[in-house]
Amino acid sequence: MKAISGQKQRNLFMIIWVIASLFLGWQLGQGQYSFDTPLAVPNLIVMLLCTVALLIWIPNPIKATLLEKSTREGPFILLILVSTVILFAVRDVVGPPLLFVLPVIAILMLILLKRPLEKREGLYALGLALIAGVTGLGAGWITYIPTTLWGILQIFLVLTGLLAGWGILRFTGLREQGVGTSRLLSEGAVPALKSFLTGLVIALPWAFLNVLLGAGNGETWVKEWWQPVIALQPGIAEEAWGRILLVPLLFLVFRRVSGSRVAFAAALYVAAYWFAYLHTPGGVSGVISAVILGTLYALPVSYLCLYRDLETAIGWHFWVDFVKFVFAFILFN
């Protein structure tokens, strides 16, 4: 019955995905790339339906058992609210330099876990870190620090973020339940490549909407044909620290007053909206933008990364930014 139900959910997503892709793809040829267009609201509604269908199709793999800790609703809600307020306040006070703290936190977690690192995980994490670091050297949207320092930061963010995040998931037993898995580590290179390509396909309507909302209008740094490939940097790095590291860290906090399934879901949602808030100017307007970005973009890629596999999420994230950079290249050249 579960397989049949899962097939129906997949089919529902595919139908909405096709409608959204055709509807949004048709608009790309109209040349109106701004949030202030008559079709902006219908576009958001269509994308919301597509997002909900995706979240239904990819369920939480953590099984609720009778032995699991029951959720203490009052303390649980209070902990979520306090954590959210602290995270949002820290973003406003510290700003972009906050990213320099994350590798330190990840290293401290690795020390506290006191578990030996697996060689294959280390090599894979290092490989992804080097790709993110090299492509980060061309991140033209970064202006507050030199791109050389930005590229070095990506290496540390990815390497420590993946290893610490995977370590927490293994320590808590969630890795065995299929949370935060890597297709390459579990099945090999070919399945990992298939997952990456699947991510590209799934991301299509989200990539179209990103352009239609004007996301590429400010990317005036894109001057060369090869520069859209730099999308690999956020595609890899932000999945490492924004999903694989941050969500398990929050899970360690929330599981003190709740069972694993509910605690992890709460951690995923809080991290998703905070991650979206990091991509806004902050303040009240930033909160409103974070609700939209978090719902339509951060939640889908979080589900793909943590409830499906890392490679699908990297492909999805890469394609959304890649298409944006390609349109920026066309617009400004």
Image (cartoon, helix red, strand yellow):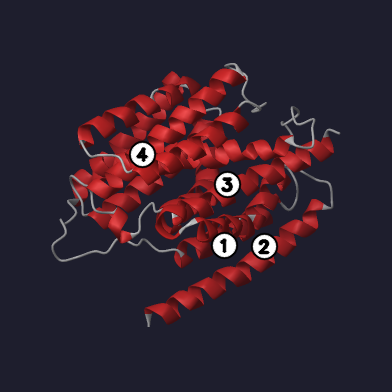
Counting from the top left corner in percent of width and height, residue 240 is at: 45, 40
Q: Relative to 155, say whether 309 is above or below.
A: below
How crowded pointer 4 is (Cα within 10 Å; few <14, some 14-19, many 20+) is rated as many
Mark toward the viewer: 4 or 1: 4
Query: Which residue does the numbered mark 2 point to in the structure image?
Result: 20
What is the spatial separation of the Cα atoms under label 3 and label 1, in whole angstroms? 19 Å
Type of amino acid at the residue the image marks with label 1:
Leu
For the view shown, which residue lies furthest in the left direction?
67
Q: Is residue 28 visible?
A: yes
Query: Which residue does the numbered mark 4 point to in the structure image?
Result: 163
Label 2–label 1 contact, CB within 8 A:
yes
Type of amino acid at the residue the image marks with label 3:
His
Mark toward the viewer: 3 or 2: 3
For the view shown, which residue lies furthest in the front direction?
119
Counting from the top left corner in percent of width and height, residue 296 is at: 55, 51
Question: Which image quadrant: the N terminus?
Answer: bottom left
Q: Total number of numbered labels?
A: 4
Q: Which mark is residue 49?
A: 1
What is the spatial separation of the Cα atoms under label 4 and label 1, in whole angstroms? 34 Å
Mark toward the viewer: 2 or 4: 4
Q: Relative to 269, say whether 154 is above or below.
A: above
Q: Residue at x 84, y 47 (%)?
A: 31
Name which of mark 3 and mark 2 comes first in the sequence. Answer: 2
Question: Which image quadrant: the C terminus?
Answer: top right
Counting from the top left corner in percent of width and height, residue 181 is at: 39, 54
Query: Which residue does the numbered mark 3 point to in the structure image?
Result: 317
What is the spatial separation of the Cα atoms under label 4 and label 3, in whole angstroms? 20 Å
Type of amino acid at the residue the image marks with label 2:
Ala
Name which of mark 3 and mark 1 comes first in the sequence. Answer: 1
